[in-house]
Amino acid sequence: MDKLVIIPTYNEKENIGKIIPAVLSLKGNFHVLIIDDGSPDGTAAIVKTMQATHPDRLFIVERKGKMGLGTAYIAGFKWGLEHNYEYIFEMDADFSHNPKDLERLYEACEQGADVAVGSRYVKGGKVVNWPWDRIFISKGGAFYTKLITWMPVQDPTAGFICYRSRVLKAIPLDEVRFIGYAFQIEMKYRAWKAGFKIKEVPITFVDRKEGVSKMTKGIVQEAMYGVWKMRKF
């Protein structure tokens, strides 16, 4: 087993039946792990129905309630390591990340990176269909993070990532503190501080067309205050 794509879900019935085939149809034998936080809209039931067609490549972990993005990914990382995957990816369910770009992230790691980040803010990257205030918050947060942590990553809150397994084995996953945007920053910061090579791959990020965004003020505030705490790691 080689490549595992982790997709956390909460009320993604409009997207889940489309994103799974899009990933499984890629060259290179990608597998998919859905971490569903008790979606009341029936997301998990859709995934289970699809498992009948892909029993060896599609998996699901069901949790009892909405526990946060970071804890979903940590659960997925542990599952992937237990099942001996070498490349473990993070990806959204809503097509804001183009499934075809998974191949480019994989290639970046194959060519020497330990962590490949699908980046909106390096040359060639861009954001489509976001309102100006969302772009302002995101770019401002990226600049703020770099200013405080000195981490040389242009898009520290990016959630489209490929990790080599050795990175996740080196990071004490049970000590990761944050669950929202700050989780994405913390994982990159811990990898960078541990000496791993991070490469940013330009992507086009497209705002979701279906479903509801999970962004809240609390998630933004966690990131603002969290970066100061990370300097103590």
Image (cartoon, rainbow, N blue to C red):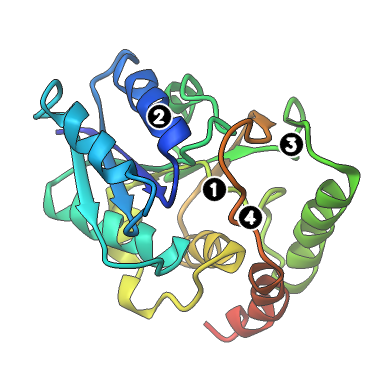
Could you tell me the amino acid type at mark 2?
Tyr
Could you tell me the amino acid type at mark 3?
Val
Picture residue at 58% right of the left edge, 55% below the top: 214
- Mark 1, residues whose alpha carbon is within 10 Å: few (<14), some, or many (≥20)? some
On residue 159, the disc is 1
Q: Going from the N terminus, do you reach mark 2 or mark 4 first?
A: 2
Which residue was labeled with disc 3? Answer: 122
Q: Nearer the viewer, mark 4 or mark 3?
A: 4
- Mark 4, residues whose alpha carbon is within 10 Å: few (<14), some, or many (≥20)? many
Describe residue 40's horizontal placement relative to residue 200 as left or right.
Answer: left
Q: Quadrant of residue 29?
A: top left
On residue 121, the disc is none
Describe residue 113's horizontal placement relative to residue 23 as left or right.
Answer: right
Q: Report how far apart the C-alphas of labels 1 and 2 lie in the structure.
A: 15 Å
Which residue was labeled with disc 4? Answer: 157
Residue 87 x, y percent position in the rendering: 30, 39
Residue 78 or 197: which is nearer the viewer?
Answer: 78
Q: Nearer the viewer, mark 1 or mark 3?
A: 1
Residue 144 or 42: which is nearer the viewer?
Answer: 42
Q: SS for tag 1?
A: loop
Q: Report how far apart the C-alphas of labels 1 and 3 lie in the structure.
A: 15 Å
Q: Going from the N terminus, do you reach mark 4 or mark 3 first?
A: 3
> Decide: marks 1, 3 in contact (CB < 8 A)?
no
